[in-house]
Amino acid sequence: MNQISPLAFVHPEAKIGENNIIGPFCYIDRDTVIGNDNVFQNSVTINIGARIGNGNEIFPGASISTKPQDLKFRGEVTTCQIGNNNSIRENVTISRGTASKGSTLIGDNNLLMENMHIAHDCVLGNNCIIGNSTKFAGEVNIDDNAIISAAVLTHQFCRIGGYVMIQGGCRFSQDIPPYIIAGKDPTKYCGVNLVGLRRRGFSNELIDTIHEAYRLLYSKGILKEGIEEIKKNLKVTPEIQYIIDFVEASQRGIIR
């Protein structure tokens, strides 16, 4: 049975599962689908196009599936899809998609801290931690297990690799490759995310191989030549292949 405050508004066309808690002054619009066991604290807004899974907790002032802040948006039918077991803190805003991709996608087990923003058509993976007041512009992709500190500004169309640690206050317009620490001003490669990888169970041998891969990659002025050095000198494990694929697929170039 759902617990819905008499001070909340739930549109009669909204589809709501079981065992949800919807606090006072929440607003749930039409064309919304909500799963089971979610907690919406007071003053949460769930806008048109929201698709929310199970076991999420959303804190006061958060607004989910907001109208995109994109002048090309013409009211097309789009969604904002949120997975399971996410913690979405106070005043977080997440826009729904546009005609470009159709959906903004949020995975599972993420912590989105206070006042951060995810723009239209972004894709956020699983097990990420995003700090206070960090902002992602449109169509940013964030891979699994990324840790992004507070007040980070990310240019549209950028990609952030998995297992990274990004220093607070960074701003960048190029891709952040996986497994690294990014920081300073301008944002640059600051080594392998040693502590983070150990916490995730990476062996010292594998961490050393990842470190060597980046030494080879950045030793050449042309990234294509660095990739060839990696293929020639290192065993291409799945982790090394991830680095290779990431760099080769980058449209904006990677930080150096």
Image (tube, helix red, strand yellow):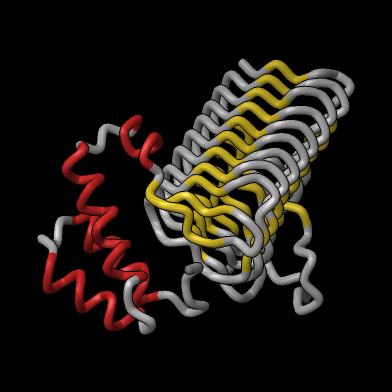
Observer-nearest of 60 and 196:
196
Q: Nearer the viewer, residue 3 or 139?
A: 139
Tell me the residue at 55%/33% (across/down). Answer: 86
How many numbered marks are there? 0
> In the rendered image, which quarter contains the N terminus?
top right
Q: Taking 2 as reference, is 75 above or below it?
A: below
- Can residue 122 be seen here? The reply is yes
Residue at the location (70% across, 41% down)?
Answer: 14
Q: Is residue 66 left or right of residue 82?
A: right
**Above or below: residue 226 compared with residue 144:** below
The residue drawn where x is 62% and y is 53% is 80
Residue 217, quarter of the rendered image: bottom left
Residue 122 at x, y = what percent? 58, 60
Tell me where residue 21 appears, x and y as whole percent.
68, 20
Q: Is residue 114 left or right of residue 61?
A: left
Q: State whether residue 113 is above or below residue 19.
A: below
**Spot occupied by residue 38 in the image (x, y as percentages of width and height):** 60, 26
Residue at x-position 75% and y-position 44%: 133
Q: Furthest residue to the front?
A: 219
Q: Is residue 120 left or right of residue 252?
A: right
- Towards the viewer: 191 or 98: 191
Residue 30 left/right relative to 228: right
State whether residue 96 appears in this view: no
